[in-house]
Image (spheres, rainbow, N blue to C red):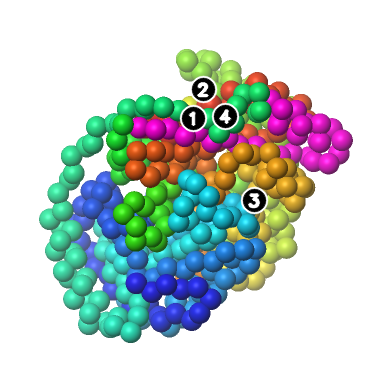
Amino acid sequence: MEQVGDEAATGVVSRATQLDGPPVRAALAAADSPRVLWSAPDEPTVVGSGTAATITATGSDRFERVRAAGDTLFDHGNVHAGTEAARPRLFGGFAFHDDHDGDLPWTGFPGAQFVLPRRQLTYTADGTWLTVNAVGPDATPEAVEASLAETAAELEDLPEPERANRPAVERRERGTTRSAWRDSVLDATDRIAAGELDKVVLAMALRVDLDGPVPVHDVLDRLAGTYPDCVRFLVEPDDSGDSVPSFFGATPERLVELRGRTVSTGALAGTTGRGDTPAEDEWLARELLADEKNAHEHEIVAETIREQLEPFASSVSTGDRSVRRLATVQHLETPITAELADDEHVLSLVEALHPTPAVGGLPPSTALDTIRETEPFARGWYAAPVGWFDAAGYGSFAVALRSAVAEGDTATLFAGVGIVEDSDPDAEWDEVQLKYRPMLDELE
């Protein structure tokens, strides 16, 4: 494994072959740490095992440093992918704040980390591909081809693991009390009324102690059935310790996708619950579309995303606002696309868009200061970009919402809400509890 910081890296040697691969759940259960899962609508699903190379960075310039290290790694490569879907990619993400310091429960997670999996399984509509990657002085085409044949034989005989019993919840500990939450929301609305803020997103953390370890591969498998239209992800720090934390989730929010010069993104803000009947569901959706508070919050997000893209784009287009229904909540959603004026790396767009007002606020610097002053826990990688990029600089990133970080028999869940001038502390508290449900339902 090659560790890559600011120094130059030896190029990647990569070979791929098609095979009768194991199911995603089995492949993930058998994967070596750091494990990767990326499963997004209209994209191949990828399971990564181990690491051939790791890129890490910290500080405010971490986006550029990751990009530079990735360019070095790919520019000196020897890649025969077999098909575009099987090409080597770097998977990972960033911390929410520039000054992330890895406080619990984020032990081992740096300010940014991307791994080139040693073994990459790519599930496409036309079949499954195995890619084996290697980096370093001993990485030769002959050695990688031999490893590819050996690994393919192992995977074709990989058994489906038994499903683990769901661990029981023994204790819950909120990171924010209800009274503290009320004070925080009222302080934020006072700042908004005074003109210091337009909006700020405040979050909470919920620690759950279980009577056994979290079976991450089973949780993600169940999330696939409950949230098929969301982006499922798993990232782990490149840590050789006995216990490695896992950050995973099923997020409804795509940050950005870049292919060629075409950018796809969107605004997702404004929330209500689901109804007990189809008629109640429709009524709640109509109320959400008509609600001034939610419409105002949503338009702040959409307008800011358009402004953030304009310096890069020859054109920006906005689709119609609609209601997106998930298992426990409904959101206002507006698709946004852009055509770039010049070739750009996806990480340049990620840096420009993070954090969107849907997870940070406006003005950005004031909102971030408010978040730091208010939240009594470390956001870590919650609400930050997770995803992948390739040698061409194309890639796909999501906002890490509806997520948890788990280590051993403990999981910490995160959820947040947008605060505007007429926000009610009790209503916002209830909305956070709704947003915990995707992960809580699969852990309990």
Element on which disc 1 rests: strand
Q: Amino acid at mark 1?
A: Glu
Q: Which residue is mark 4?
A: 432
State the image coordinates of residue 315 (x, y, percent, origin top left). Answer: 69, 59
State the image coordinates of residue 173 (x, y, percent, origin top left). Answer: 49, 30
Q: Nearer the viewer, mark 2 or mark 4?
A: 4
Residue 9 left/right relative to 288? left
**Residue located 64% across and 39% down the image:** 375
**Residue located 77% across and 47% down the image:** 366
Which badge, 1 or 4, is on the more N-terminal residue? 1
Q: Which residue is mark 1?
A: 173
State the image coordinates of residue 207 (x, y, percent, origin top left). Answer: 47, 34
Mark 1 and mark 2: Cα distance apart in space: 26 Å
Residue 155 left/right relative to 184? left
State the image coordinates of residue 94 (x, y, percent, origin top left). Answer: 54, 57
Task: Give the class, few, some or many, for how many residues have Cα within 10 Å of label 2's Cα (few <14, many ≥20).
Answer: many
Q: Quadrant of the C terminus?
A: top left
Q: Is residue 98 above or below residue 208?
A: below
> What label does residue 355 carry, if any?
3
Q: Is residue 303 above or below residue 123?
A: above
Q: Nearer the viewer, mark 1 or mark 2?
A: 1
Quarter of the image for residue 32 reads: bottom left
Which badge, 3 or 1, is on the more N-terminal residue? 1
